[in-house]
């Protein structure tokens, strides 16, 4: 159980650190096509996106770990719905995350009210970034080592495929830093209270014992991460499918290959994230929390 939980945390955190057609268009290089697509995408105000994340490891068959869909309006207002699978528990949790500028809001599927997220809450901010297209493109730009075209298996689809290879040293450095940040510090008391409510822990003494248990687990995780960092090797790349007319990305696919030693055992994992981007400049409906004039706290 402990190993599987750490595997999931590692892969998700590495993924936030992040990731091609033999194609020639007016003599443009792969780098030029990529940069044009990046600039065009970051200039978009409204669009929809959806996708999934799959994990395959030595001890875990490939399966959807996360299924998500979302929409963007006015560039900085983002709403997304997440279905999170927990194979070791045989359960699926559904939640929504919304961003109005820099402010995040969350709610689980059974809740009516949105919860305002503290700006220093790394867990929720990381969860939001994991599935936020803009965050992925920015990370891709900061970690890219090489850009090249990839042969398109369907040359008549009006798409050009671009591979963005990530710098493995930067990828590892960022992944280890974020893992350490994730496991460090005290448990957020507000989130502890909400988690206790979710688990139906009402007694103050039980909540205290639950907090102590989380703190102990956090310390153990810190030590495991420190041991694992010395053996961590990771490679990553993105494959972008770019429309040859608009030069906007239609699909973004992330591949991560990770190897490390955990508790004396070799671990090998492959992570794949597929994200489809569509309906640019379409009308986008947003929940009340993101409507103009809403000042909910």
Image (cartoon, rainbow, N blue to C red):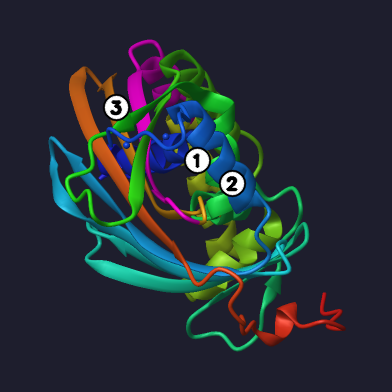
Tell which residue pokes out farthest to the front in this image. 26
The disc placed on residue 258 is 3
Residue at image coords 33%, 59%: 52
Q: Nearer the viewer, residue 248 or 76?
A: 248
For the residue pair 200 and 275, the one nearer the viewer reads as 275
What residue sits 44% from the left and 69% below the top? Answer: 69
The percent position of residue 102, horizontal first and vertical second, equals 77, 57
Quarter-of-image position of residue 256:
top left
Q: In this rendering, would 19 be left or right of 193?
A: left
Marks 1 and 2 close (CB-CB < 8 Å): yes
> Crowding at label 1, few (<14), some or many (≥20) Cα neighbours within 10 Å?
many
Asked whether 125 or 140 is in front, the reply is 140
Q: Secondary structure at mark 1?
A: helix
Q: Give the extent of the magenta segment.
A: 222-245
Give x and y (percent) for residue 278.
46, 67
Task: Relative to 14, say whether 4 is above or below.
Answer: below
- The residue wearing badge 2 is 135
Q: Report if the CB atoms under discs 3 and 2 are less than 8 Å apart.
A: no
Nearest to N terminus: mark 1 or mark 2: 1
Quadrant location of the C terminus in the rendered image? bottom right
- Residue 255 or 37: which is nearer the viewer? 37
Per the model, the C-alpha gap separating discs 1 and 3 is: 14 Å
Label 1 vs label 2: CA separation?
A: 8 Å
Q: Quadrant of residue 104?
A: bottom right
Q: Quadrant of the N terminus?
A: top left
Helix, strand or loop under label 3: strand
SS at badge 2: helix
Residue at image mark 1: 16
């Amino acid at each position: 159980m402990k190993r599987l939980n750490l595997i999931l945390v590692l892969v998700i955190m590495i993924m936030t650190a992040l990731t091609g057609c033999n194609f020639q268009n007016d003599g443009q290089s792969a780098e030029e096509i990529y940069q044009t697509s990046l600039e065009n995408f970051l200039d978009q105000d409204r669009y929809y996106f959806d996708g999934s994340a799959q994990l395959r490891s030595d001890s875990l068959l490939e399966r959807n770990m996360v299924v998500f869909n979302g929409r963007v309006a006015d560039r900085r207002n983002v709403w997304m719905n997440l279905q999170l699978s927990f194979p070791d528990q045989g359960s699926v949790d559904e939640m929504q995350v919304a961003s109005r500028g820099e402010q995040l809001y969350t709610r689980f599927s059974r809740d009516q009210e949105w919860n305002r997220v503290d700006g220093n809450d790394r867990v929720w901010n990381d969860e939001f970034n994991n599935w936020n297209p803009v965050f992925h493109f920015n990370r891709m730009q900061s970690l890219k080592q090489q850009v090249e075209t990839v042969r398109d298996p369907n040359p008549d689809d009006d798409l050009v495929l671009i591979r963005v290879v990530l710098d493995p040293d930067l990828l590892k450095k960022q992944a280890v830093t974020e893992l350490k940040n994730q496991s460090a510090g005290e448990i957020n008391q507000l989130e502890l209270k909400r988690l206790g409510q979710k688990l139906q822990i009402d007694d103050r003494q039980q909540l205290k014992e639950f907090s102590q248990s989380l703190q102990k687990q956090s310390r153990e995780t810190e030590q495991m991460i420190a041991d694992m960092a010395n053996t961590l090797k990771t490679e990553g790349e993105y494959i972008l499918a770019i429309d040859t007319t608009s030069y906007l990305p239609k699909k973004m696919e992330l591949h991560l290959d990770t190897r490390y030693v955990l508790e004396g055992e070799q671990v090998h994992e492959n992570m794949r994230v597929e994200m489809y981007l569509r309906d640019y400049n379409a009308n986008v409906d947003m929940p009340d929390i993101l409507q103009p004039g809403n000042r909910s706290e």
